[in-house]
Amino acid sequence: MSVSSLLAAALLQTATPAPDLSWLAGYWLDCSGGREASETWSDPRAGLIVGHTVTVRNGRSGFESARIGPLPDGGLAYFAQPGGAPATPFRLIDSGPQRAVFANPDNDFPHRIIYERTDGPLGDRLTARIEGADDDENRSVQWRFNRAELNARCPL
């Protein structure tokens, strides 16, 4: 066996497998704070998860496209595109069975995106949180989504 074959075999054995983020898949709805926010996430396919968010508040709507996929260096990132803007990558820095934390300290706001799924007395929930400094002031925004039927809407 050649030295390059041995090196390749050693790298394959020590490579960290991609985290399982299949728990994110589904349609999620948040009807709190006078807004209607929905997130839809695909199941992972060949290392790619695709999502979008629609938010309605005070008769106005906004959207964000997103994807979770590989970086050129082999890492994983959340690529955010609010309102169709160019993609901003947030590297996966921590993950667990139903939790993922993405970070980009060079972004204006947010610096971190955190997703966590729980199943409890309130049902199947997905919490999304963005946080960081905005004009040197720490702030965060959080959404508490419930699993819902595709295209479900908040009650009037």
Image (tube, rainbow, N blue to C red):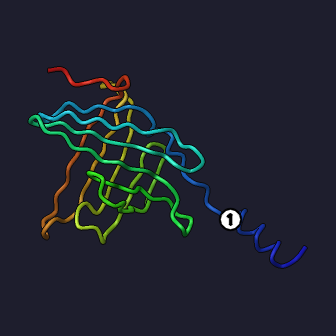
Q: Position of residue 138 (x, y in %)?
A: 16, 63
Q: Position of residue 48 (x, y in %)?
A: 52, 49
Residue at image coords 45%, 59%: 77
Q: Which residue is mark 1?
A: 14
Q: Quadrant of residue 27?
A: top left
Q: Position of residue 1 (x, y in %)?
A: 90, 73
Q: Quadrant of residue 133?
A: bottom left
Residue 155, placed above or below residue 127: above
Give the amino acid type for the residue marked by disc 1 in the picture.
Thr
Q: Quadrant of residue 30?
A: top left
Looking at this view, is 77 or 62 the one in front?
62
Residue 53, placed above or below residue 13: above
- Total labels: the figure holds 1
Q: Is residue 19 left or right of residue 15?
A: left
Residue 147, placed above or below residue 71: above
Q: Secondary structure at mark 1?
A: helix
Residue at image coords 50%, 55%: 69
